[in-house]
Amino acid sequence: MQKTILIVEDEDILREIVKDYLLHDGYKVLEATSGTEALSIFEEHEVHLIILDIMLPKLDGWSVCRRIRKTSNVPIIMLTARTDEDDTLLGFELGADDYVTKPYSPPILLARAKRLLEIRYAAHKPSKDNLLSKNGIVAHLPSRTVTINGEDINLTHTEFEILTYLMQHKGIVITRDQLIQSIWGYEFTGDDRTINSHIRNLRSKLGEHSASIVTIIRTGYKFEDQI
């Protein structure tokens, strides 16, 4: 099925360049030039990934990301001309899956979008290995859904990847570098605080089951049985 990507960018030339790359690669493209327009389009269409600029008229990218995350775990790549690490962390804390700083290479942006889409919507053959169930947390890999005691937990793409990777390696200490290579798969421009931010969000959503994710000081994390 052809995937639809929503580009939210108020710079016409930059938006057209990114659009051309995506169309050439076979994606359907929707465009928005403001935050409010982006939310309207998202509500009216099936969108598989969002490329979201932060500095937008009417409603900034952070606000758009925050509102979308209330109802959807669609992959979001945020774009910014700002290089402040705190801005990057804020984007991740709001649920962004990736963060690209301007100026950037359109082919690299396309590669990042393609990887997120491949992971998020990859087809899986029926198998018992498609279901992870530990400590009352159940993750269904084909649908990328997580339930706790039968209740759905809305995780972002990155939170789902972290949780399932830790569950698949239960009892093994996983370093932050291992998580980065597993999830992003390319040269990472963030730092340890980025992973910490995702873990913090994930634990918040897991509630009383958050104790399953144990911090190993100066090393990384481990998924353990709850006592």
Image (spheres, grey):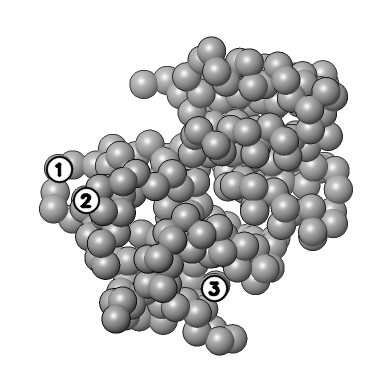
Q: Which mark is residue 176?
A: 3
Mark before the other along the chain sequence, 1 or 3: 1
Q: Nearer the viewer, residue 142 or 2?
A: 142
* Secondary structure of the residue carrying numbered label 3: helix
Q: Position of residue 174 (x, y in %)?
A: 44, 76
How many tags in the picture? Answer: 3
- Does residue 71 appear to the left or right of 126 in the view shown? right
Q: Nearer the viewer, residue 147 or 115?
A: 147
Residue shown at the point (27%, 42%) measured from the top left: 142
Q: Which mark is residue 126?
A: 1
Q: Position of residue 59 (x, y in %)?
A: 78, 27
Residue 119 falls in which quadrant of the image?
Answer: top left
Residue position for label 2: 130
Residue shown at the point (31%, 76%) measured from the top left: 226
Quarter of the image containing the N terminus? top left
Q: Are marks 2 and 1 in contact (CB under 8 Å)?
A: yes
Name the residue type under label 1: Pro
Residue 19 visible in the shown view: no
Compared with 24, 52 (above or below) is below
Q: Which mark is residue 86?
A: none
- Does residue 143 appear to the left or right of 28 in the view shown? left
Q: Residues within 10 Å of mark 2 (few under 14, many from 20)?
A: some
* Secondary structure of the residue carrying numbered label 2: helix
Q: CA distance from mark 1 to mark 3?
A: 31 Å
- Does residue 198 appear to the left or right of 164 in the view shown? right
Residue 154 visible in the shown view: yes
Compared with 92, 21 (above or below) is above
